[in-house]
Image (tube, helix red, strand yellow):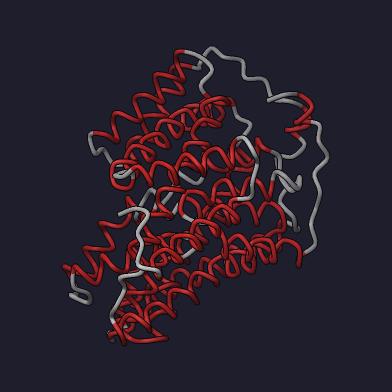
Amino acid sequence: MPSNQKSEVKVTPSFFELTWAFFIIGLTAYSVAMLQQLKTLVVGRKWLSQKEMDEGLAMVQLYPGPIMFNLATYSAYRIKGFWGALIATFLFILPSYLLMVLLSWLYFNYGNVAWVHPLFIALEAMVVGIIIHISLDFANRYIDGGKTAFISGLAFILLLYKINAFWVIIFAVLFGLMFFWKDSMKVDTNEQTQKLDIPGKWQWRLTAIIVSGSLFLAFAALAFFYKTELSTLFLSMFKVGAVAFGNGMTIMPLLQQEAVISHHWLSMKQFADGIAFGQITPGPFLITATFIGYKVAGLMGSLLATIGMFYPSFFYTIIMSEIYAKIKDYLFIRRGLKGILAAFTGMLFFVVLSMGKVTLHSPAAYIWAVGALIAVRYYNLNILWIFLSGIALELSLFLMGISVLG
């Protein structure tokens, strides 16, 4: 990273600025494109440095939960402490929760979701273009030689052969330790002074961690011992959120196992429609948990399922942020992180391939993808306007009986 970036003075936003900004991201960011939105906001406004964001991205892959949600929590915690993280992540997920409740009500009362399909494919095509931009950006920063290129390529191949993302990260850490053992990887003085830069006195942070940890255990215990339909639903979503690694797509099979196979809450068609709703709504992809909860027990079910899915990730991120702030400058940690960031580059290109195979099946889909890539990479257009323009155009054509993607 250039030295002028290291010496940039960070800006501390007000509580309202932080929480409102996260609400807007939750209202407008789709799929893996949330990564670009978060970086544009947090780094662009100098709330965190580019290096802090990238190291946070490496950190959030080391424990269970949806990666983009974990990264949002990490960012808010580093900027404004525990209460900032709690309120900001609540507002981050609120828009997608409310939209999913509305869609669930329409679906289970009327059942016609034909309009979802064209929107889903148009959005996915645009997301592919955004992810290509992110992948190229990561490759430019973290593929700096044959060793990092090897780790990146290995991660891509392992995912191609359906190796769990957790093991990919473990391999990346091991190769990082082996390949970069002789590298000095000197730490800039300005970075060292930021090592414990988490707002709030440590006593209050420790109290917050103990309280949130107690809630974590209490939620699990109540759901386990108090046997009702709602508790079974909550425990099922809590279990998925507490143990599943990776992004929404890698966690989705576990969600399917719980909702369709184990408990028969949804048919396979309903589950597939719930996934489609998770794609066309902004925010975390695993908001599909809200759809499942609504089917089981209405509004209360949707609320408990959502809390069960995302609370473990929130708790893990708070704990890991505290640990990470204290150990991130150790040489063996930095070498491991270098391996992870190289691997994540390969993983991003795998996402491009996977989504491209599903989405880019017509000339018009390629136009959506290439158009989004050009708009964000070469014209620096806000992703919100890219997505809104695509949604408005595709929905208008659908209502007129025309399918651009058909």
The answer to which quarter of the image holds residue 222 is bottom left
As displayed, is residue 141 above or below residue 254? above
Q: Position of residue 242 (x, y in %)?
A: 38, 60
State which quarter of the image contains the N terminus.
top right
Q: Is residue 185 above or below residue 34?
A: above
Tell whether 164 sits left or right of 394.
Answer: left
| Residue at image point 35% right, 78% down | 293
Where does the image place residue 199, in percent across and percent down from the top left?
74, 55
Give x and y (percent) for residue 123.
43, 55
Q: Is residue 286 visible?
A: yes
Residues 397 and 377: in front is 397
Q: Nearer the viewer, residue 110 or 344?
A: 110
Between residues 223 and 142, which one lies in front from this camera angle? 142
User: Would you identify the image quadrant in which residue 236 lies?
Assistant: bottom left
Residue 62 can be seen in this image: no
Please give the name of the residue rendered at 40% of the width and 23% of the height, measured from the top-left corner: 151
